[in-house]
Image (cartoon, coloured by chain):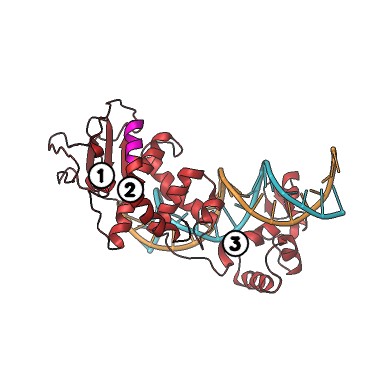
Chain colours: A red, B cyan, C orange
Amino acid sequence: MEVGGLTGDFRSPSTLKAGNNQMAAGDVKKGPWTEEEDAVLINYVRIHGEGRWNSVAHLAGLRRTGKSCRLRWLNYLKPDLRRGNITLEEQLTILDLHLQWGNRWSKIAKYLPGRTDNEIKNYWRTRVQKQAKQLKCDVNSKQFRDALRHVWIPRMIERIRASSGQTATTGQYPDYSMTSYVRTVPEVSISTTSSTTSDSSSECYKPINDVDFPTQMDPCCPDSGSGRFSDQAQVAGCGTDLSMDGASDNMWSLDGGDDDLQSVLWDNIWSQENIGFLHGQLYGEDFM
DNA sequence: AACCCGACCAACCGCGAGTAA
DNA sequence: CTTACTCGCGGTTGGTCGGGT
């Protein structure tokens, strides 16, 4: 459908309801913003402030919808926006908060100063969903969420610690030893201060706290452990396979597992020491 | 050099909540 | 109470760019 050079259902009732009815169809411009348009919008907001976006579009002489002006300002022109790659800490925040809130992008964005909901959403879709796709998991499945909790997030914590110059003491932070283990197996046997069984043939790992784990399998990713990952590990006796692709920094696979194991790992990840460190890293002192 | 492909991200769309008339 | 309108959110699309072949 073409309406005055526009495509789609621009004039549909819902769209009109959404506030696009302030301009005749032929007046509306779509697509990438020009420098001139940006300058007009910036100048207008500087004088009149944010809000009343339909008025902005009209009074500033922009041939854009109010929605388009708002989006351009919030996602690109606003002065305090951060540009550039999303940091490890920011990634960790996103993963952590997404586990709590799901796709509440704007809510998550409130904890990432200078980042927009759009940016976070894009990160999630391009990075995280890609992982899920490669693991043949649904991104919202319990398996994938558990993998986030027990593999990806701990590993990020370790990396943040490493980059901040702190040593991940395995005795104090047993979960880190697991992520370290995931990275190094099978070339290097396990070395932790907890009771560890290192078996070069089975690459078994005695889990933290000497908890007995059932052997129930709950396959998530049928292909994991098939050899397409360079690094693989198994949490002994619990049926959980952890795999890490050495060629790519964030490629991993979690296959199987058990609620008891996951809760124990989770408890250790969120030990008081770790929480204190993490929240300091993520949210600053004000958060706690 | 040309083409392909995946990653990234800006922008659009539909919808629902809130609110004023 | 109803209607019209604004705003914001989450999902989706499409353009651009860089790396690989």
Residue A124 to residue A77: above or below = above
The amino acid on which the numbered mark 1 sits, given as a three-letter code, is Met
The CA span between labels 2 and 1 is 8 Å
Secondary structure beneath dot 3 equals helix
Pair 2/3: label in front: 2
Magenta-drawn segment: A259-265
Circles 2 and 1 in contact, beta carbons < 8 Å: yes
Going from N to C along the chain, the mark reached first, 2 or 1, is 2
Query: Residue C12 in the image: x percent, y percent?
Result: 56, 44
- Residue occupying the point 69% across, 55% down: A5
Task: Confirm whether residue A120 shows in the render.
Answer: yes
Asked whether, in this view, residue A251 is left or right of residue A52, the answer is left
- Left or right of A198? Residue A242 is right
The residue that mark 3 highlights is A74
Q: Residue at x 53, y 66 (%)?
A: A81
Residue A262: in magenta span:
yes
Q: What is the spatial separation of the Cα atoms under label 1 and label 3, in whole angstroms?
A: 41 Å
- Hey, which quadrant is residue B2 in on the image? bottom left
The verdict on a common chain for dots 2 and 1 is yes
* Left or right: where A47 falls relative to B1: right
Q: Secondary structure at mark 1?
A: helix
